[in-house]
Amino acid sequence: SLPNATREVSKIQMLGSAINIVTGSWLLKSEVAYIDGIKYNSTLDEKARVDTLVGVDYMGIKDSVLSLEIANKRIFDYETQMSGAPTGIIPYVPDYTQEDEVQTAIRATRSFENDSINTTVLLSMFGHNWQYGGFFRASVTYDVVDAVVANFGVIDYIDAAKKEDKPFMNAISNNDRVFADITYSF
């Protein structure tokens, strides 16, 4: 069972930049953001963080895009109790966050029948070795007519290798679902 954890969000300061470079069938992308003034539950100090992302898209296969993105969130002045490890010093609500939080996303999209059918498969995993879990999503969108779109798919939540490392991820790991919807735009 998880403690009742809420994060109070205050005003933060952020500065960021992104660059995309196209070369042939490849799109190379990179982003960086410096964020200052983040409050965490397990420490009284506001923290600064740098978020970085590098990625590549390959569009050399007709009607398809293959993508790989790796992101990292680096917390400065990290304190051990932020991981959720008890310190015994003061009672607190743990954040279950690491100094470096890595996320890897692999995605494949493909369109068929003159873009009336679009498929997407996405795997998003957390941790250097994917040890903190993630999710898998597969979906199909079908343009029935110009104003009607049907969407259906599946989501599978993957829990962490060690349940105590990411209890929030483990709390949702049994919420896998199949979904379907029809949208009429007028």
Image: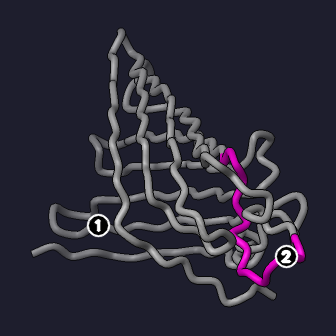
Q: Can you tell which of label 2 and label 1 is closer to the viewer?
A: 2
Q: Position of residue 179 (x, y in %)?
A: 52, 75
Residue 5 in the image: above or below residue 37: below
Q: Position of residue 118 (x, y in %)?
A: 39, 49
- Residue lying at 64% horizontally and 49% vertically, measured from the top left: 77
Which residues are the magenta region? 87-101
- Residue lying at 67% horizontally and 90% vertically, measured from the top left: 4
Q: Quadrant of residue 164?
A: bottom right
In the shown orientation, is residue 9 left or right of residue 126? left
Q: Which residue is mark 1?
A: 149
Q: Which residue is mark 2?
A: 89
Q: Position of residue 81 (x, y in %)?
A: 78, 65
Q: Position of residue 75 (x, y in %)?
A: 61, 48
Amino acid carrying mark 1 in the image = Val
> Around disc 1, counting alpha carbons within 10 Å, would you say few (fewer than 14), some (14 to 19), or many (20 or more)?
some
Q: Main secondary structure of the magenta part?
A: loop
- Residue lying at 63% horizontally and 45% vertically, measured from the top left: 103
